[in-house]
Image: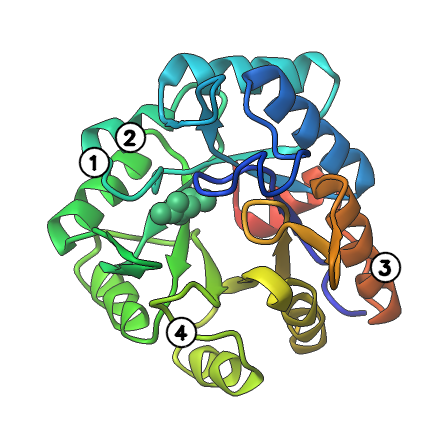
Amino acid sequence: MAEKVIVTAAVVGAEVTREQNPAVPYTPAEIAQAAVDAWRAGAAAVHLHARWPDGRPSQRPEHFREIIDRIRQAGSDVVIQCSTGGAVGMPVDERLGSLVDGAEMGTLNLGTMNFGDEVFQNTRPDIVRIAGRLRERRLVPECEVYDAGMLDTLRWLLEKKHLTAPYHVQLVLGVPGGMSASERNVRFLLEGLPEPTHWSIAGVGRFQLPMAELALALGGHVRVGLEDNLFAAKGVLAKGSDELVSLAVKLAQRAGREPAAPAEARRLLGIA
Ligand code: KMH
Ligand code: ZN
């Protein structure tokens, strides 16, 4: 039987705004509710960012703590993954604020790149430092790969033992400045993945659901949610990340892949 699929919900991110879609959550209570709704819809994991109540991105530990506490108080056992990417322009010290008690995974962005009209800086020393912090805190890294050369960085990190298994790879495709979300690019990237690796695709914008479908067909996992895409269909705003998770779950079932429960996701991802 095909491996169960881990659906990760990226419920807010650092860039999207309520002006673009009124369902974008800002406060810790709203972000926690969005995460719980996504879990109820079938997400096994949530990729978390935080915001100040006015919508500015935040990596403040107290915001992440409140989000996680609220998720657990709601009775959800969803896997908690905290962003160390934060927002463009944030210093690494600030970005590391998200790695609070209760986090189970943390992201590891594998290179500097144009991110829209800005630069998302991740120097090799930054990457090594973040990898070290994830290791110290016994968090499973999710390696965010936006472009082909970042897989060479992944191999370098493994070779130098800055990174060791278990880790997860997220192919984030369609960021303006990164690799585009095409089947050809996905197949090329998969050829370069170290073995054995669990991998997932996060397609940006209108590529979100087509990339989910492709990941499902190729044996990967999927990430959906408002961080990466605001629409449920062409011209139709998503009512929340849970709606996008429901669509991904339907695609999974059509592809003969059952969504993993959080406990199964922990087993697959090597979370102790
Ligand atoms: N907000 C982006 C610049 C991550 O979460 O680790 C970076 C990002 C990646 O969202
Ligand atoms: Zn993110």
Alpha carbon distance from label 4 to label 2 = 26 Å
Are the residues flagged by discs 2 and 1 in contact, CB closer than 8 Å?
A: yes
Instruction: Using the image, tell me which numbered label, if any, was put on residue 250.
Output: 3
Q: Is mark 3 within 8 Å of ligand 2?
A: no
Give x and y (percent) for residue 253.
Answer: 86, 63
Q: Earlier in the sequence, mark 3 or mark 2?
A: 2
Q: Earlier in the sequence, mark 4 or mark 1?
A: 1
Q: Residue furthest left?
A: 125
Q: In the displayed structure, would residue 165 be above or below residue 33? A: below
- Which structural element holds mark 3? helix
Alpha carbon distance from label 4 to label 3 = 27 Å
Alpha carbon distance from label 2 to label 1 = 6 Å
Does residue 107 show up? Answer: yes
Give x and y (percent) for residue 25.
Answer: 60, 28
Q: Earlier in the sequence, mark 4 or mark 2?
A: 2
Alpha carbon distance from label 3 to label 2 = 35 Å
Residue named by callout 1: 92
Give x and y (percent) for residue 169.
Answer: 45, 60
